[in-house]
Image: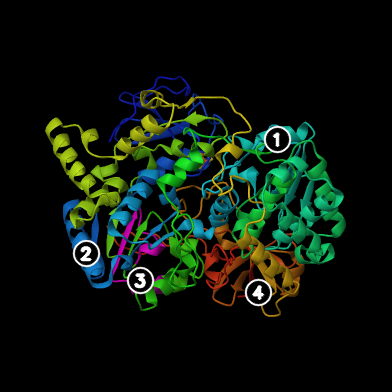
C-alpha cells in the first residue's frame, strides 16, 4: 500500500513529536470529501486536522472526520479473518479463509447457480470505490446479478431520475449556491449536512447564508423544525410523504401564470405531458394532500419562478418515503421549466474529467434491464431493494439467496423491519461480513473479514468528477499502513475470484495477468506491481481524460484543473433523443395513480407519522461506536405537547412507539419543534456491537427506529421504504 509523502505545511501550531509527520488525504465519510491533514508516527494517528491546502474543500471539517482515527484504532476492531466455530470465532490466516470460502461458494454455485450468491453494499462500502469496483468484478466473474445496496433505502430515486430524465443513473447537478436568488429546499438540512449528499458544495451552508444576507430567498419545506428551517425566510410544515403534491401544485401555478422558461421548455421532450398533468390536477386537492394552503403554494410558485435565479433541491427527507421518486422527479421538473437546469444560479453540471462523463459512466456499467424475483422491482444502480432481501433468502425457487457477502454495511439497522432480515440472515448457508466491526447485521456471520479504514487505503473518487462543484481532482492517499497487515477489500475480492477460478471482471485473461503481476511483485519486492485499483485509474485517466496521472500522484492536496462553467450539460445527455425528458412514462403512470387515491386520512390505530432528523455527530449507523456525544439522541422520541398531553405522557417518560410491524421503547422529549401528528426519532441507533475476539456482552446505544418501518410499504418504482412517514402510535410504557 502506498503511503503519501510527508508534508511540512505549518497549518498546526503544535510541534510535531520526534518521528511524527503530516500526511494529506480526504475524508470519505460523506460526500463533502473534506481535506484532512493527519499527524502520525506511521504506526498510530495522533490527531487529524483540516487540510488548509486542499484545493477543493472549505478548509474545515466536522467532528466525524476529525475523530476518524478513533475508529481506526478502536479496541474492538477486527484485524484478522475470523471463522465461526460453534458459538465462537477463531482467527485464521487470509489464505485459509480464502480457500475455505471459495470452496463453499463454488459448492453453492454448483448446486444452485450463480444467483444463489448475493452481495450487499453498505454506506461505508459505497464510499469505498475500490472495494465496490472489485466486488463488482467478483460478481461479474461469478455471473450473479443478485446485488443489494444501501441506495435502496435512500438514493434510488436520484439514480432512477438521472436515468429517466437525462439518460445516466449518475447524473449529478450541483446547486450553484453563490448565484441563486431563491432556494427551495425539500427534506434537506444543510445546516447539519454541510450541503453534501451526492452533489457537493464545500461549506455550502455558510455560502447559502451569505447569499441570503445578500437578498436571496430561502424557502425550506420540512415537517419539523431543524437548524435549517430556523434560518429560513419561510418554513413550510408539510405533511410527511406528500412533497410531490406541493411540487405539482407549484408547477401547475407556474404553467397557469405563464411563468415558465419557454426556451428550456421547448428544448425538452414531453413538456406537453407534464403541462397536462399539472393542468388536470386540482390545486385544492393537492393542497389538502400536502397540508399546505393554496395561497402558500401560489406564493412559493411566484417567489421561485419570478426570482432572477433559483434552485430547487429535494433530498433524503423526500427520497426516503413511499413517494420519494415523484418528489425527486418533480423537483427536477420544476428547475427545468423555470430555466434553472444547467444555468448560473440554478443546478449546473460539472463535466468532470472525461470528454463525456455521462457516456463514460454508462459504458463502464452498461444498463441491463432486469427485475427482482420478489416484488418485480427493476435493478437500480445495479441493485435490488434491500426491503425484498428477507423474502429473497426465505422463498424457495431458482435464484433463492443461499450465500450473502455484506460489504461494509449494517442492513438490519439501515433497512426496514430489521427483525425480518435478521431472522432471514440466520437461515443462510453462508454469511460473510467484511467490516471493521461485528455489528448487528453480522451476528449470524460464518466469516468475519476485516474491513480497511479509509485512512489506510487509496481512493480516486475523481472518476465521478461531476460530484464536485469545480473541476477538481485528488488521489486520496493512504496515510497509514492497514492495522496488523489486514487487506483492503479489493484485494479480498480479487483473491477470492482467483481461488474460485472465475474470470475476474468477466475477463478470463485478466486472471492470468493478475497471477503474473503477483509474481513480478514478489520478484521486485514492490507491491504496486501487483494488479491493484491504480492500474484501472491510471488507464482511465490516460485514455479518457486530459489530466496527467503524474500530476494526480504528486499533488496530495488535490488540484483544480479548470474553471466553474455552465452550459455543459445538454450536449452530454444520454437520452435516446438527446433531450431532457420532462415526464418519463413510468413516473407519469405512478403520479396518475396517486392523484386517484383518496386524500390522506388519519389512521385510527396509528395516527402519528414518524420522521427522522440528521445530527452533526452521526452518519447512519457506522459511527455510533466512535464519536463522543453530549447525548444519545437515539434514546428519544420527539413529540408535540398536544400529542403528549392526549396520551398522558410527560418529559423523559419511557414510552412505547408502536407500528404495525414492531414496537420500541424510548424516552419522550416534548417539543413543539415537531407539529401535532408527527413524531421524530433519529435513525442509525440501536445497533449492537460485538467483540468476537474477547467475547462479552455487546454494546448498544439508543434504539433502532427503522425496525418500526414495514418492508412492504415501498415506493412503487424504487422499492425505497417509507422511512419518513411510517404510521405509528405512542403510549406510556
Ligand atoms: S464527515 Fe465531516 S469531515 Fe468527513 S467529509 Fe463529511 S463533513 Fe467533511
Residue beneath disc 4: 729
Classify mark 3: residues with Cα within 10 Å, few (<14), some (14-19) or many (20+). Answer: many
Up/down of 471 relative to 268, above or below:
above
Q: Earlier in the sequence, mark 4 or mark 3?
A: 3
Q: What secondary structure is marked by label 4? A: strand
Residue identified by numbered label 1: 345
Say whether marks 2 and 3 touch (CB < 8 Å): no
Q: Are marks 1 and 4 in contact (CB under 8 Å)?
A: no
Is residue 437 covered in magenta?
yes
For this rendering, which residue is in front, 34 or 514?
A: 514
Task: Tell me where residue 340 appears, x and y as whole percent.
Answer: 70, 40
Dots 1, 3 in contact, CB < 8 A: no
Q: Quadrant of residue 286?
A: bottom right
Q: Viewer-proximal residue, 151 or 362?
A: 362
Q: Earlier in the sequence, mark 2 or mark 3?
A: 2
Question: Which residue is identified by label 2?
Answer: 106
Between marks 1 and 3, how big is the CA–CA gap? 48 Å
Tags 1 and 2 in contact by the CB under 8 Å rule?
no
**Coordinates of residue 124 in the picture (x, y in percent):** 43, 50
Label 3 SS: loop
Please name the residue that numbered disc 3 is placed on. Answer: 399
Q: Is residue 86 above or below residue 530?
A: below
On the image, the x and y values in percent for residue 128 come to 40, 46
Q: Is residue 245 visible from the viewing direction of this image? A: yes
Quick check: can you spot residue 694?
no
Return the x and y of residue 554 as percentages of the image width and height.
37, 23
Label 1 and label 4: CA atoms lie apart by 43 Å
Judged left or right of residue 624, residue 488 is left
Above or below: residue 718 compared with residue 512: below
Amino acid at each position: 500500500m502506498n503511503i503519501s509523502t510527508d508534508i511540512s505545511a505549518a497549518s498546526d501550531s503544535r510541534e510535531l513529536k520526534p518521528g511524527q509527520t503530516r500526511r494529506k488525504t480526504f475524508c470519505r465519510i460523506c460526500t463533502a470529501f473534506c481535506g484532512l491533514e493527519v499527524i502520525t508516527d506511521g504506526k498510530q494517528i495522533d490527531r487529524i486536522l483540516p487540510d488548509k491546502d486542499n484545493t477543493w474543500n472549505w478548509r474545515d471539517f466536522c467532528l466525524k472526520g476529525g475523530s476518524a482515527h478513533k475508529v481506526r484504532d478502536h479496541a474492538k476492531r477486527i484485524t484478522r479473518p475470523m471463522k465461526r466455530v460453534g458459538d465462537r470465532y477463531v482467527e485464521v490466516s487470509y489464505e485459509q479463509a480464502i480457500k475455505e470460502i471459495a470452496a463453499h461458494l463454488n459448492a453453492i454455485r454448483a448446486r444452485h447457480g450463480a444467483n444463489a450468491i448475493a452481495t450487499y453494499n453498505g454506506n461505508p462500502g459505497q464510499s469505498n470505490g475500490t472495494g465496490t469496483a472489485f466486488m463488482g468484478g467478483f460478481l461479474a466473474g461469478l455471473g450473479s446479478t443478485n446485488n443489494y445496496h444501501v441506495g435502496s433505502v435512500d438514493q434510488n430515486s436520484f439514480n432512477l431520475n438521472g436515468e429517466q430524465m437525462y439518460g445516466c443513473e449518475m447524473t449529478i447537478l450541483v446547486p450553484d449556491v453563490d448565484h441563486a436568488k431563491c432556494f427551495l429546499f425539500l427534506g434537506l438540512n444543510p445546516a447539519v449536512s454541510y450541503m453534501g449528499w451526492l452533489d457537493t458544495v464545500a461549506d455550502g451552508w455558510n455560502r447559502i447564508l451569505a447569499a441570503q444576507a445578500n437578498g436571496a430567498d430561502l424557502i425550506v419545506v420540512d415537517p419539523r423544525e431543524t437548524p435549517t428551517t430556523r434560518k429560513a425566510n419561510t418554513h413550510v410544515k408539510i405533511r410527511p410523504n406528500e412533497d410531490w403534491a406541493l411540487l405539482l401544485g407549484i408547477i401547475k401555478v407556474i404553467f397557469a401564470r405563464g411563468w415558465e422558461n419557454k426556451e428550456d421548455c421547448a428544448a425538452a421532450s414531453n413538456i406537453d405531458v407534464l403541462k397536462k398533468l399539472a393542468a388536470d390536477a386540482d390545486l385544492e386537492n393537492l393542497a389538502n394532500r400536502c397540508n399546505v394552503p393554496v395561497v402558500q403554494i401560489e406564493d412559493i410558485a411566484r417567489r421561485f419562478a419570478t426570482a432572477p435565479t433559483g434552485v430547487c433541491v429535494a433530498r433524503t427527507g423526500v427520497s426516503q418515503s413511499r413517494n420519494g421518486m415523484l418528489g425527486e422527479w418533480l423537483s427536477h421538473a420544476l428547475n427545468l421549466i423555470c430555466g434553472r437546469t444547467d444555468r448560473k444560479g440554478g443546478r449546473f453540471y460539472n463535466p468532470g474529467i472525461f470528454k463525456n462523463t455521462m457516456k463514460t459512466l454508462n459504458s463502464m456499467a452498461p444498463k441491463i434491464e432486469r427485475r427482482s424475483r420478489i416484488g418485480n422491482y427493476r435493478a437500480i444502480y445495479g441493485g435490488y431493494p434491500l426491503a425484498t432481501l428477507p423474502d429473497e433468502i426465505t422463498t424457495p425457487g431458482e435464484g433463492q439467496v443461499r450465500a450473502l457477502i455484506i460489504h461494509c454495511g449494517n442492513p438490519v439497522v439501515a433497512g426496514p423491519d430489521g427483525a425480518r432480515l435478521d431472522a432471514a440472515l440466520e437461515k443462510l448457508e453462508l454469511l460473510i461480513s467484511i467490516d471493521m466491526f461485528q455489528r448487528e447485521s453480522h451476528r449470524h456471520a460464518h466469516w468475519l473479514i476485516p474491513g480497511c479504514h479509509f485512512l489506510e487505503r487509496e481512493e480516486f473518487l475523481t472518476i465521478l468528477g461531476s460530484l464536485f462543484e469545480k473541476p477538481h481532482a485528488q488521489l486520496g492517499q493512504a496515510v497509514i499502513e492497514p492495522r496488523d497487515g489486514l487487506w483492503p477489500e479489493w484485494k479480498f475480492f480479487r483473491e477470492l475470484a482467483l481461488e474460485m477460478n472465475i474470470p475476474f471482471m468477466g475477463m478470463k485473461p485478466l486472471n492470468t495477468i493478475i497471477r503474473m503481476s503477483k509474481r513480478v511483485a514478489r520478484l521486485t519486492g514492490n507491491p504496486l506491481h501487483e494488479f491493484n485499483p491504480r492500474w484501472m485509474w491510471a488507464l482511465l485517466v490516460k485514455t479518457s481524460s486530459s489530466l496527467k496521472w503524474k500530476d494526480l500522484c504528486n499533488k496530495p492536496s488535490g488540484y483544480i484543473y479548470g474553471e466553474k462553467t455552465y452550459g455543459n450539460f445538454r450536449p452530454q445527455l444520454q437520452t435516446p433523443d438527446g433531450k431532457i425528458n420532462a415526464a418519463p412514462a413510468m413516473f407519469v403512470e405512478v403520479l396518475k395513480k396517486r392523484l386517484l387515491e383518496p386524500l390522506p386520512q388519519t389512521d385510527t390505530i396509528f395516527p402519528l407519522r414518524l420522521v427522522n432528523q440528521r445530527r452533526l455527530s452521526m452518519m447512519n449507523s457506522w459511527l455510533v461506536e466512535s464519536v463522543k456525544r453530549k447525548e444519545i439522541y437515539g434514546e428519544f422520541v420527539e413529540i408535540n405537547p398536544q400529542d403528549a398531553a392526549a396520551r398522558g405522557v410527560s418529559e423523559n417518560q419511557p414510552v412505547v412507539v408502536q407500528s404495525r410491524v414492531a414496537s420500541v421503547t424510548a424516552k419522550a422529549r416534548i417539543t413543539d419543534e415537531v407539529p401535532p401528528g408527527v413524531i421524530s426519532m433519529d435513525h442509525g441507533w440501536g445497533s449492537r456491537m460485538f467483540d468476537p475476539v474477547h467475547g462479552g456482552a455487546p454494546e448498544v446505544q439508543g434504539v433502532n427506529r427503522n425496525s418500526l418501518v414495514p418492508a412492504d410499504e415501498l415506493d412503487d418504482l424504487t422499492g425505497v421504504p417509507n422511512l419518513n412517514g411510517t404510521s405509528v402510535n405512542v403510549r406510556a410504557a
